């Protein structure tokens, strides 16, 4: 009977330790703040639109597929915005100079932007917009800063 009592004690100890261990052993999601600085605006009109993407879906022309979109008033020299509490991972950013504040990239009849545009890594497109793979970067620090220069086509 003594061994049955010890077995019961072990079972009770395991019953309480295993659930406690499973709660404490879950990995912590690492997050941080990503500051984006945009420069080379041709004037101080309008606002700068920022779109943060975590996949190639819709990049860079469909902000509805971005995980975050924000507009910041343009001051004519450089504009910055900080995405806060972002889960560390792979991202790409698209920005544009919304000169007329209509919250969309205005294009000519060929679809070429009339307003300034740019993406992370200052990636350039070839016969179209830049690809996600060219603009992506690893967000892996608690505080990280990238700079994007606008291009007027």
Image (spheres, grey):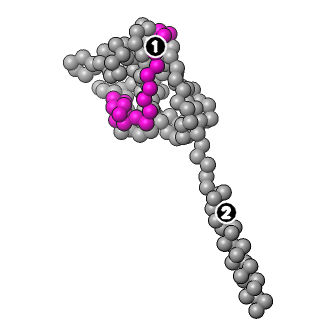
Q: Residues within 10 Å of mark 1 (few under 14, many from 20)?
A: many
User: In the image, residue 35 lies at what x, y percent?
Assistant: 55, 26
- What label does residue 46 carry, if any? none
Q: Nearer the viewer, residue 132 or 30?
A: 30
Residue 40 appears in the figure: no
Asked if residue 41 lies left or right of residue 1, the reply is left
Q: Is residue 66 magenta?
A: yes
Residue located 44% across and 12% down the image:
41
- Indicate the quadrant where residue 104 lies: top left
Asked if residue 66 lies left or right of residue 35, the reply is left
Residue 9's place in the image compared with 111, above or below, is below
The residue singled out by tag 2 in the image is 20
Residue located 72% across and 78% down the image:
10
Residue located 75% across and 85% down the image:
5
Residue 82's place in the image compared with 31, above or below, is above
Residue 18 appears in the figure: yes
**First in sequence: mark 2 vs mark 1:** 2
Q: Residue furthest top?
A: 43
- Dot 2 falls on a residue whose secondary structure is helix
Q: Which quadrant, please, contains the N terminus?
A: bottom right
- Dot 1 falls on a residue whose secondary structure is loop
User: In the image, residue 95 lies at what x, y percent?
Assistant: 42, 23
The residue singled out by tag 1 in the image is 74
- Indicate the quadrant where residue 128 lies: top left
Asked if residue 13 lies left or right of residue 105, the reply is right
Region rendered in magenta: 58-77
Q: Residues within 10 Å of mark 2 (few under 14, many from 20)?
A: few
Residue located 43% across and 18% down the image:
48
Q: Which quadrant, please, contains the C terminus?
A: top left
User: In the image, residue 9 lies at what x, y percent?
Assistant: 74, 79
Which callout, 2 or 1, points to the residue nearer the camera?
2
């Amino acid at each position: 009977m003594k061994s049955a009592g010890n077995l019961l004690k072990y079972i009770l100890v395991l019953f309480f330790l295993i659930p406690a261990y499973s709660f404490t052993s879950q990995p912590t999601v690492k997050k941080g703040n990503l500051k984006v600085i945009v420069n080379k605006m041709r004037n101080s009109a309008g606002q700068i639109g920022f779109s943060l993407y975590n996949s190639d879906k819709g990049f860079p022309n469909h902000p509805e597929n971005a995980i975050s979109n924000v507009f910041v008033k343009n001051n004519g020299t450089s504009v910055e915005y900080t995405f806060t509490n972002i889960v560390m991972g792979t991202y790409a950013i698209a920005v544009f100079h919304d000169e007329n504040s209509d919250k969309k990239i205005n294009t000519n009849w060929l679809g070429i932007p009339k307003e300034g545009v740019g993406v992370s890594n200052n990636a350039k497109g070839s016969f179209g917009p830049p690809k996600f793979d060219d603009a992506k970067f690893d967000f892996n620090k608690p505080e990280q800063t990238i700079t994007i220069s606008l291009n007027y086509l």
